[in-house]
Amino acid sequence: TMSESMEVDTPAASTSAPPPEPVQPAAEEDEEEDCSDLADLLDSISDATPADKIPILTSILNEPKNRYGSTAAALKERAVYALARAYCEDNRHDAVVTLLTGETCAPFFANITKAKTAKVVRAVLDSVCALAPEELDMQAQICQNIIAWCRAEKRSFLRQRVEAKMASVLFQQDKYGEALTLVDRLLVELKKLDDKQLLVEVHLVESKIHHGLRGMAKSKAALTASRTSANAIYVAPSLQSQIDMMSGVLHCEEGDYDTAHSYFLEAFEQLDQLDDREKAVPCLKYMMLCKILDGLNKALGLSAATGVAGIRSDHKNEADISGMITGKRGVKYAGRNVDAMSSIAAAASKRSLKEYEAVLTEYSHELQDDLLIKHHLSTLQEQLLESNLIRIIEPYSCVEIEHVASLIDMPLPVVEKKLSQMILDGKFHGILDQGKGQLIVYEEADQDQAMEKGLKVIENMDKVVTSLFGRSQALRSMMV
């Protein structure tokens, strides 16, 4: 009986173990042969219109044989990407919204790994955002659908990445409150997981949101947190360029135009190497803006040091701008954006307010749609108005305000208000005689050194008395 049982066991073992080995190659061969029809269908759409591609690609994803081997999965992955592009090219944005979470891709996602699903979803989302950058409502709806699907499927890591994208889309829609709420909640989760890569991206979005809300201190703190996380990992050049660009924006807001220009230059060089024209052009515009503002500020700074008669055009600034736009890179990125900034530079160098306003009207789209440029162009307009007013009043010790308004071709109340602001800001010494409607300009008076030193002595004595009073209070408390 032992021998019989052994004889029985050995054949059973031999019959159960070997079959998988020969079956797998055969299945793979059959699968490769069977997938030729899917490959032919995918190749047949190369010359088709977007409307003709859509039914073919849908048939590949919903084919009746339900093949999800390695070759079939790779072909269907390509079909998903091609279908997203076809929908965008055909302007069927409603179909794009339901593509990933609808019935078309559901069987495919159910039969591939979670990591593969996350890769496909993120790639499709990035592709749709690149193909339809202006369709922010569609992007937001896609993100909301994916987030809801991730919650139902309990896919936390993919949900966090899509929520980071959602925050970026909300920021572009100027929905700063919703974006900040989402970012704050997301950062709590990410700090627990210590996901450095995503922390860099989310802190960067947080910095942009606070900048949009004009909270410069919080924006700078968020950017510092993003840089701190970035120092611990490898950061792709595209993301590093965004960090450098945001650093330049914050330095520009603080008035440190030289440092801002260096950051923008670093970001521009990285984007130029990546051949990312869409993001490189704004960097070039910011670099030109920094040169314009820095040149005008230096011209006005010279006047503050040498008096009213010291104001003059900054010819060096104009040369720097011309060198920037006539170089190799300037020629590469030539267009209306660069023309707009060069026209602004020409108006600033001439200190021509009329020419400046004409440029703003002609290039309104290129100059007013960007938050940073729009804000600083208003500052530049104020500086040009001040420099024009100072140029007009240079020869006079007493001049009628109405005459100044007629020369600068602006309403009298606006000119009167601006002159009073300039006197209060110390741009020049004078008074407004509103009874006579005149502006009286005084010469720059030497500062009274005795008065200044006397004030410093009084300030130091106050510190000494305050310190002695504090010590006497301490001694009294010890004696009691």
Image (cartoon, rainbow, N blue to C red):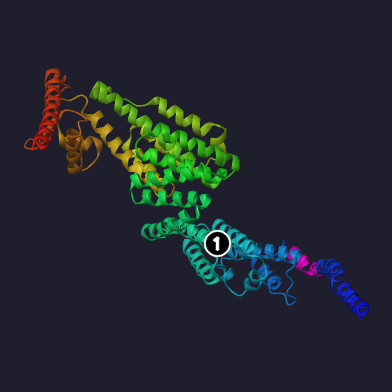
Q: What's the amino acid at mark 1?
A: Leu
Q: Main secondary structure of the magenta part?
A: helix
Residue 437: image quadrant is: top left
Q: Residue at x 60, y 39 (%)?
A: 273
Residue 228 horizontal/vertical position (percent): 46, 43
Residue 360: image quadrant is: top left
Residue 49 horizontal/vertical position (percent): 67, 65
Q: Residue at x 41, y 28 (%)?
A: 317
Crowd tier of the residue under label 1, counting other residues whose Cα lies within 10 Å: few below 14, some 14–19, many 20 or above: many
Q: Which of the two residues, 436 or 345, is positioned nearer the viewer here?
A: 345
Q: Which residue is mark 1?
A: 158
Can residue 394 be seen from the camera position used here? Answer: yes
Left or right, 29 with respect to 381, comes to right
Outermost residue, bottom side:
1
Left or right, 260 with respect to 16, comes to left
Instruction: Report the quarter where the C terminus lies.
Output: top left
Residue 185: image quadrant is: bottom left
Q: Is residue 188 above or below residue 37?
A: above
Range drawn in magenta? 34-43
Q: Residue at x 41, y 41 (%)?
A: 249
Instruction: Report the quarter where the N terminus lies.
Output: bottom right
Residue 364 horizontal/vertical position (percent): 40, 48
Q: Which of the two residues, 65 or 300, is positioned nearer the viewer here?
A: 65
Residue 102 colored in magenta in the image: no
Residue 383 horizontal/vertical position (percent): 29, 36
Q: Is residue 395 above or below residue 116?
A: above
Left or right, 101 with respect to 248, comes to right
Residue 38 colored in magenta in the image: yes
Outermost residue, left side:
435
Secondary structure beneath label 1: helix
Can residue 336 be seen from the camera position used here? Answer: no
